[in-house]
């Protein structure tokens, strides 16, 4: 059985690699680290011009309506380049929320603007001192307005609107579209381990809001969006993990000790081999996820959890071993080893921690066996 991408998708990969090699070097990522800008605006505009933000949007809403397999390829290459742009928040989360649950009017208004890059979206579900947003939000919706706080919100300082999970009535919750440029919204930047990816605290002071879709349960929306986003994040993490592996390998080949490359020492060989094994396992699970999202399979919950867990573990392991391979210089500011490590730690906490996804994987397997 052939799990590889098609010739068309491989061509897209080659084009993406060439584009990102020219426009998103680690030097450019480091510049974002050290600047006041929360993201690389020039790179974002070029990504928009390539049509990547329109990849999954149907043609009737001025999108490209490409297969989700194409989006997986784009996600991997953005992860490989460690791109400092709000692609995941706007495309994996906000765009998908509208495609899956938006009314016709909401889709017609927002999707063309998301496709053209006119607006950036984000998804606000997590709240302070909560292990999981699945436990139910404290943010409330009443009389057409939302009050409460969300933290952390990826790209919350950048986005023009947010899909906000809020409590509606005594028991139910739902998702709501909120204009983040409203004067009733307070945006507070939040420092994170990765300065190249924006994080914010959003405070809603009775902000006007519109319910997403037609009375859909918030838990249903959250589960569907997170399962799909987990697969795309997994591809991004696998791309980053391979960058860490190649960074370690290249350094080991060039660095000499005792008259020979350190890559010739068995301890270094073992490090690189273990990184490769974990990356390969994660990629295998990502293929499973890519199949599930592209076919809208009933197995998507299991595939998403498996891909998410293995990619978190692979990216963290590779980024950590990359620093170790560089030795005493690996943890210094001057070396780029920190960039994949920072991204690995940040992505591991987006849309739920490793422990949460372990529980989701166990639950999905139990449900499958019970059926």
Image (cartoon, grey):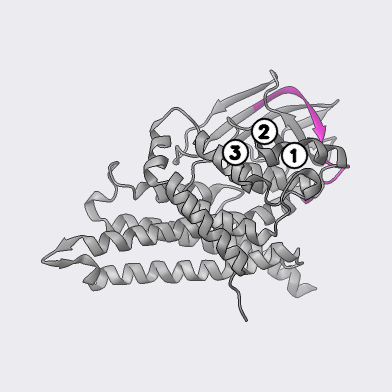
Residue 344 visible in the current orientation: no
Of labels 3 and 1, the one closer to you: 1
As helix, strand or loop, the secondary structure at mark 3 comes to loop
Which mark is drawn over residue 50?
none
202 to 77, vertically: above or below:
above
The residue at the point 86 percent across, 42 percent down is: 103
Residue drawn 40% across the image and 40% down it: 28
Q: Are marks 1 and 2 in contact (CB under 8 Å)?
A: yes
Residue at the location (76% across, 34% down)? 177
- Asked if the residues shown at circle 3 and circle 1 are in contact, with their CB atoms under 8 angstroms apart, the answer is no
SS at mark 2? loop
Q: Which residue is mark 3?
A: 129
Name the image quarter holding the N terminus.
bottom right
Residue 168 horizontal side relative to residue 80, left or right: right
Is residue 259 at all visible to an observer of this figure?
A: yes
Mark 1 surroundings: few (<14), some (14-19) or many (≥20) residues within 10 A: many
For the residues labelled 2 and 3, the Cα–Cα distance comes to 34 Å
In the rendering, at what x and y percent does residue 96 appear?
72, 48
Residue beneath label 1, please? 112
Q: Between disc 2 and disc 3, whose residue precedes?
A: 2
Q: Position of residue 143 (x, y in %)?
A: 86, 25
Precedes in sequence: disc 1 or disc 2: 1
Return the residue nearer the eye: 15 or 369. 15
Which region is colored magenta?
203-220
Image depth: mark 2 or mark 3 in front: 2
Residue at which label 2 appears: 118
Q: Earlier in the sequence, mark 3 or mark 1?
A: 1
Asked if the magenta segment contains residue 328, the reply would be: no
The number of discs equals: 3
Instruction: Give the quadrant of the C terminus.
Output: bottom right
- Category of crowding for the residue at label 2, using alpha-carbon neighbours closer than 10 angstroms: few (below 14), some (14–19), many (at least 20): few
Local packing at callout 3 (Cα closer than 10 Å; few below 14, some 14-19, many 20+) is few
């Amino acid at each position: 059985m052939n799990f590889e991408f098609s010739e068309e998708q491989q061509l897209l990969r080659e084009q993406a690699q060439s584009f990102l090699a020219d426009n998103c070097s680690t030097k450019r990522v480091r510049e974002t680290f050290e600047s006041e800008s929360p993201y690389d605006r020039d790179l974002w505009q070029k990504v928009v011009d390539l049509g990547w933000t329109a990849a999954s949007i149907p043609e009737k809403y001025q999108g490209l309506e490409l297969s989700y397999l194409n989006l997986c390829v784009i996600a991997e290459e953005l992860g490989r380049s460690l791109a400092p742009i709000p692609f995941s928040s706007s495309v994996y989360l906000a765009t998908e929320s509208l495609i899956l649950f938006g009314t016709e009017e909401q889709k017609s208004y927002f999707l063309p603007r998301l496709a053209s890059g006119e607006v950036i979206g984000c998804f606000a579900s997590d709240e302070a001192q909560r292990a999981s947003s699945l436990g139910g939000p404290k943010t409330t919706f009443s009389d057409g307005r939302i009050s409460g706080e969300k933290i952390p919100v990826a790209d919350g300082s950048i986005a023009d609107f947010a899909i906000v999970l809020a409590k509606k009535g005594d028991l139910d919750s739902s998702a709501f579209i909120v204009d983040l440029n409203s004067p009733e919204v307070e945006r507070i930047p939040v420092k994170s381990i990765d300065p190249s990816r924006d994080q914010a605290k959003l405070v809603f002071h009775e902000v006007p809001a519109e319910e997403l879709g037609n009375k859909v349960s918030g838990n249903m929306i959250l589960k569907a969006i997170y399962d799909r986003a987990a697969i795309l994040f997994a591809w991004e993490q696998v791309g980053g993990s391979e960058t860490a592996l190649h960074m370690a390998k290249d350094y080991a080949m060039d660095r000499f000790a005792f008259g020979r490359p350190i890559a010739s020492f068995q301890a270094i060989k073992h490090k690189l081999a273990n990184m490769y094994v974990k990356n390969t396992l994660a990629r295998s699970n990502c293929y499973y996820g890519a199949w599930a999202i592209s076919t809208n399979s009933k197995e998507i919950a299991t595939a998403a959890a498996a891909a998410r867990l293995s990619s978190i573990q692979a990216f963290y392991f590779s980024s950590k071993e990359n620093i170790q391979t560089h030795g005493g210089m690996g943890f210094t500011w001057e070396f780029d080893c920190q960039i994949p490590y920072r991204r690995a730690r940040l992505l591991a906490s987006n849309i739920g921690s490793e422990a949460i996804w372990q529980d989701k994987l166990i639950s999905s397997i139990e449900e499958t066996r019970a059926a």
